[in-house]
Image (tube, helix red, strand yellow):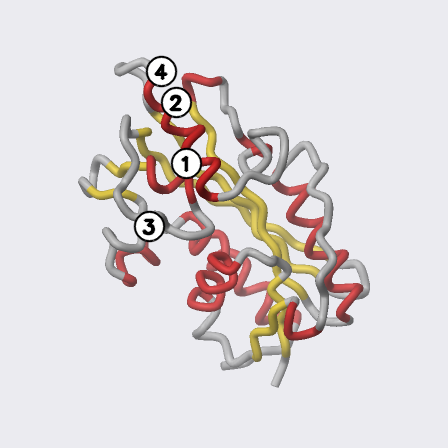
């Protein structure tokens, strides 16, 4: 069976990507499964640069096809910040709890008539040979003044991201699995790149 490496140490992403890829007859491998503890510096200026960099480096390190993503929260009233620096908005790799506390202050100061925000992501699929492909997706919502009561581990910004059309938070406790898959921006990007994965890895079913 073909193997696909998930090029991330984020346990939330590993779980979510694993679910989104579960319909493919492939063996999903994590970085810990192959003994990789290295962190790739996300120093690109765009989501695509970071996503491709991670996919390519980890694919070459493991000698396996790899899937990586990079994305962030873009708040309209802040000119698109934090964007590509979402996890490092505090000047370092912030913990979920640190980001929640920072977002409480940010959310309180946003104007009531402009709380629109977007989650954007680029998913990249790379081979050890250096070939790489990418797909993009996003979802729009609004930033709430107070966070959802329960933290979605690995995704602190989702605690403030509300979907007016569904009247729900973008949170695993609010959205049933099938509903989450339907609207999830990362799922949309993964679905867009699946035909490339199938073709490249000669997956027929």
Q: Position of residue 103 (x, y in %)?
A: 41, 29
Q: Quadrant of residue 29?
A: bottom right
Gap between marks 4 and 1 measured at Cα: 15 Å
Q: Nearer the viewer, residue 173 or 73?
A: 173
Viewport quadrant of the N terminus: bottom right
Q: Quadrant of residue 196?
A: bottom right
Helix, strand or loop for disc 2: helix
Q: Secondary structure at mark 4?
A: helix
Of label 1 and label 3, which has the lower sequence position?
A: 1
Residue at 55% across / 56% down in the picture?
10
The residue at which mark 3 appears reads as: 183
Using a 10 Å C-alpha cutoff, classify the residue at mark 4 as few (fewer than 14 neighbours), some (14 to 19) or many (20 or more). Answer: few
Say which residue label 4 marks: 109
Which residue has dot 2 on it?
A: 105
Mark 1 or 3: the one toward you: 1
Question: In the picture provided, is 48 more to the left or to the right than 60?
Answer: left
C-beta proximity under 8 Å, tags 4 and 2: yes
């Amino acid at each position: 069976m073909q193997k696909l490496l998930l090029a991330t140490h984020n346990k939330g992403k590993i779980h979510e990507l694993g679910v989104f890829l579960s319909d493919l007859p492939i063996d999903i491998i994590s970085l810990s499964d192959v003994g990789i503890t290295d962190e790739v510096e996300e120093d690109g200026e765009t989501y695509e640069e970071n996503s491709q960099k991670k996919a390519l480096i980890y694919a070459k390190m493991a000698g396996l096809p790899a899937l990586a993503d990079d994305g962030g929260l873009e708040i309209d009233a802040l000119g698109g910040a934090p964007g590509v620096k979402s996890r490092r908005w505090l000047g370092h790799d912030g913990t979920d709890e640190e980001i929640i506390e920072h977002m409480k202050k940010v959310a309180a100061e946003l104007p009531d008539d402009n709380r629109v925000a977007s989650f954007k992501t680029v998913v990249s699929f790379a081979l050890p040979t250096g070939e790489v492909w990418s797909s993009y997706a996003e979802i729009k919502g609004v930033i709430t003044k107070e966070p959802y009561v329960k933290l979605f581990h690995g995704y602190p910004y989702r605690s403030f991201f509300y979907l007016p059309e569904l009247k729900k938070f973008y949170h695993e406790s609010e959205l049933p699995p099938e509903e989450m898959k339907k609207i999830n921006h990362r799922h949309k990007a993964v679905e867009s790149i699946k035909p490339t994965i199938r073709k490249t890895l000669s997956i027929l079913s």
